[in-house]
């Protein structure tokens, strides 16, 4: 019984750890998307300011080129994080399933102990 309680506590810890990991990844994705959107606005503003929209033009803004590179890097990182997020969510689901099973087994063990104690007290009386 005690070992099962230890396993349940371990699973609960793992669930909370996975939840934190999922939330952290979600926060990073949101931040990268926000930064990417801000860079997109800055790029468009710079293009309007200079009047040159073709990034291959010889006089294209170096600021806009650098911002495009940063934006593209952020988008690539966000895409990679989305893959990590899918994996983390799947791992969370697995740990939650294991926790549920262990809690059900622990509950069943506790019910058995209560029934055994009840029978024992009835036999003594």
Image (cartoon, helix red, strand yellow):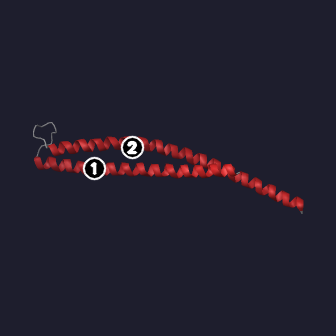
Residue at 76% across / 53% down in the picture?
112
Residue 5 spot, x, y in % from top left: 66, 52
Q: Is residue 105 above or below residue 119?
A: above
Q: Which mark is residue 81?
A: 2
- Residue plotted at (18% across, 45% down): 64
Which x, y percent locates residue 28? 37, 49
The residue labelled by disc 1 is 37
| Badge 2: residue crowd in 10 Å (few <14, some 14–19, many ≥20) | some
Q: Position of residue 73 (x, y in %)?
A: 29, 41
The image position of residue 3, as x and y in percent, is 67, 49
User: Which of the two discs, 2 and 1, labels the residue nearer the N terminus?
Assistant: 1
Q: Secondary structure at mark 1?
A: helix
Q: Nearer the viewer, mark 2 or mark 1?
A: 2
Q: Do the residues under discs 2 and 1 have CB atoms within 8 angstroms?
A: no
What label sits on residue 115 in the rendered view?
none
Examine the image and state in which quarter residue 72 appears.
top left
Q: Is residue 65 left or right of residue 15?
A: left
Residue pushed farthest bottom?
A: 125
Look at the numbered disc 2 and give the secondary structure of its residue. Answer: helix
Q: Residues within 10 Å of mark 1 (few under 14, many from 20)?
A: some
- Quadrant housing the C terminus: bottom right
Q: In the drawing, does residue 15 fall left or right of residue 77?
A: right
> Which residue: 69% across, 52% down?
2
- Say whether residue 44 is left or right of residue 106: left
The Cα–Cα distance between marks 2 and 1, rounded to whole angstroms, is: 17 Å
User: Residue at the location (76% across, 55% down)?
Assistant: 113
């Amino acid at each position: 019984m005690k070992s099962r309680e230890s396993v349940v506590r371990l699973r609960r810890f793992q669930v909370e750890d996975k939840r934190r990991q999922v939330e952290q990844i979600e926060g990073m994705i949101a931040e990268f998307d926000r930064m990417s959107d801000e860079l997109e606005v800055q790029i468009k503003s710079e293009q309007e300011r200079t009047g040159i929209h073709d990034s291959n033009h010889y006089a294209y803004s170096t600021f806009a080129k650098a911002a495009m590179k940063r934006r593209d890097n952020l988008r690539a990182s966000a895409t990679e994080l989305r893959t990590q997020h899918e994996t983390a969510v799947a791992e969370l689901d697995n740990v939650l399933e294991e926790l549920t099973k262990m809690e059900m087994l622990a509950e069943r063990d506790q019910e058995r102990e209560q029934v055994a104690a009840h029978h024992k007290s009835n036999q003594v009386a």
